[in-house]
Image (spheres, grey):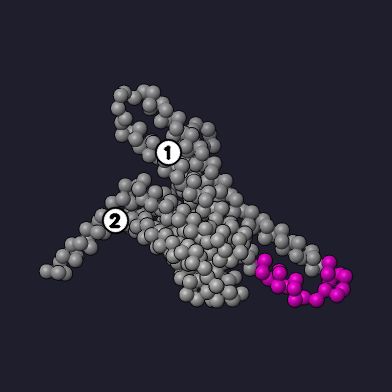
Amino acid sequence: MMTSFVLLCLSIAIIESLAGILGNGIILAASSMSCIGSKTWPPYDMIVISLSSSRFIVQSWNTLEYLLTIFYESFFCQENVNLASKIIFTFLSYSSLWFGAWLSVFYCIKVASFTQSFFIWLKLRIARLVPWMLLTSWLCSFTAATSFTLDVYSVHENITAPSSMTNSSALTTTKKDSLGLLILICNAGIAMPLILSVVSSVLLIRSLWIHTRHMQNNASGFRDSSLEAHMKAIKSVCSFLFLYIICFVCVLFILFNIFSPLSNGEMICVVLMAACPTAHTFVLIWSNPKFQKLPPRIWHHISCHGRTACM
């Protein structure tokens, strides 16, 4: 029986996901418009389009799942439906986490002012590396999602298959251990985007802070626009990192069933998991003038069209 707290959390998560769909739609539209007609896409737009599209899809999927949970709770109790839902959610969530990590890496490489030879090498070749980075993310996400199918198949095989003979039992145990190791490796790979995001964000914050301190020491009695821009960038990166870590932990809690279904702990994770990408999306819009200009243009177009229709 669904409690009022569960219903409240699912309703909040639906509203947050709908807001995220709107925000990611704005980013996706603005980035796509700037790429139309160009033979080569800028690496930043490639990453942002991949991130916003993956979030748009995963938040749409989550909204559908939350609505079905509210109005048709028994639907997800079916084994095949639950497995398919987990595979799709895993693939989309892992992809979103990977793309968010690559965005942090891109910011660090383009903005931070380090003089190490490897960093300079990355700065010069980042445009050519981005497509391979995105392709690797899709492959890693697909592998991790597929591991859930193997896990369920292995448990089902272990329960149903007879093991009366010693050799057969030993062979089954060996297969299970090997499969378990493969599943562990596949899911341990999700730690990589977290490491990339944390390291790149910390390096970028350090670089921006050093540069900001240098500007403050050399500045006159007023805060110039460049200093304001650096402080705004530091706040944005800190918020990106904070939201990313919370979302990452909540995704893992949901995927590995840390809490029982529809428990208070799972519902809190659901609310946070819906809130963090949405907040990250709107911080991204707030920090980029190109994304800020699109909503007023859309609203102006709708208003003009509405006034024309009324005449």
Q: Seen in the image, is 203 located left or right of residue 171? A: left
Per the rendering, the mark at residue 57 is: none
Q: Which amino acid does label 1 sit on?
A: Ile
| Residue at the spot 52% in from the left edge and 61% down from the top edge | 267
- Residue 144 visible in the snapshot: no
Kindly identify which residue carries mark 2.
Answer: 295
Q: Where residue 56 sits: x, y (%)? A: 43, 61
Q: Where is residue 211 in the image (x, y as percent from the top left)?
A: 42, 30
Q: Residue at x 66, y 69 (%)?
A: 152
Count of numbered badges drawn on the protein:
2
As drawn, the residue found furthest toward the right would be 166
Q: Residues within 10 Å of mark 1 (few under 14, many from 20)?
A: many
Alpha carbon distance from label 1 to label 2: 25 Å
What span is in magenta? Answer: 150-170
**Image coordinates for residue 45, horizontal then vertical, percent:** 40, 52
Q: Main secondary structure of the magenta part?
A: helix
Circle 2 sits in a helix, a strand or a loop, which is it? helix
For numbered disc 1, what is the local secondary structure?
A: helix
Q: Which amino acid does label 2 sit on?
A: Pro
Query: Quarter-wise, where is residue 158 in the image?
Result: bottom right
* Quarter holding residue 74: bottom right
For image coordinates 54% across by 37% down, the residue present is 118
Residue sticking out furthest to the left: 311
Foreground residue, 119 or 79?
79
Image-based side of 163 in relation to 264, left or right:
right
Q: Is residue 29 left or right of residue 94?
A: left
Residue linked to disc 1: 234
Q: In which quarter of the image is residue 1?
A: bottom right
Q: Residue at x 48, y 59 (%)?
A: 271
